[in-house]
Image (cartoon, helix red, strand yellow):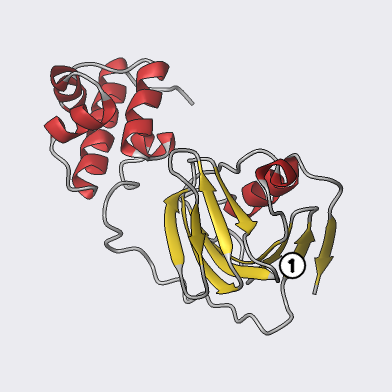
Amino acid sequence: MTDTTTPETANSQLGQCLKAARQARGLTLKQVAERTGMALSTLSKVENGLMSLTYDKLLQLTSGLKMEIAELFNPAAGRPEQGRPVTARRSISRVGQGQVVNTGSHTYTYQCTDLIGKRMVPILVEARARSLAEFGPLLRHAGEEYFLVTRGKVAVHTEFYAPEILGVGDGIYLDSTMGHAYLNAGDGPATGICLCTSEAPDLHDQLRQIVVRDGPPLNDERQ
């Protein structure tokens, strides 16, 4: 099959995707320029299909807008999900069930593992590490997450903020691409619920790979 894509067509598609992503976030071109450090005139030309961007500029743009680079090549990705078909998917997690991953510093129990391609990954977390030295490198992955403390005290360390101590019922919402770690800050056990979200269809696998990346051999159990 002959590829009929021309540079003009590619530029037009990039412009349409950028405009869709910008409008989905309620931003003006000026605000995009401020967030990304790119020239307003450049962004205007891109949206109007008059020029393309180098890979470095694409990374600069997506980083400033906290978006996946794939969104710039999928016209529907940045738009409200009008007409999205109802999947009618559901999964119930019972007490004591889940995919358990034990590392030296944490126990992660992944919920609803019978569903694949989830945009949200719910995880029960038990934090045992009490220092960053014991924890290891800060975690980073695509998307955003919310952590709610259900028992004990948890110290939240992030790349750009001073540590925060959270008690039972306290929660934190953060950009998952920012380095972060959850440590036990109390005398007894510390547990919480972590909800990770991303457009990446393999989010569950990404999270598991990150968890075991720098840790000791893990014990992976399916209950």
Q: Can residue 119 be seen in this view?
A: no
Percent of width and height locating residue 156: 53, 54
Q: In this view, does 73 lie above or below 163?
A: above
Left or right of 57 in this view: 30: left
Q: In which quarter of the image is residue 155?
A: bottom right
Indicate the amino acid at tag 1.
Answer: Gln
Kindly state the secondary structure of the residue where label 1 is placed: strand
Residue depicted at x 31% and y 41%:
75
Quadrant location of the C terminus in the rendered image: bottom right
The residue that mark 1 highlights is 99
Residue depicted at x 36% and y 32%:
62
Percent of width and height locating residue 142: 51, 44
Q: Is residue 12 above or below residue 113?
A: above
Q: In this view, does 32 lie above or below 164?
A: above
Residue depicted at x 38% and y 67%:
85
Residue depicted at x 27% and y 61%:
82
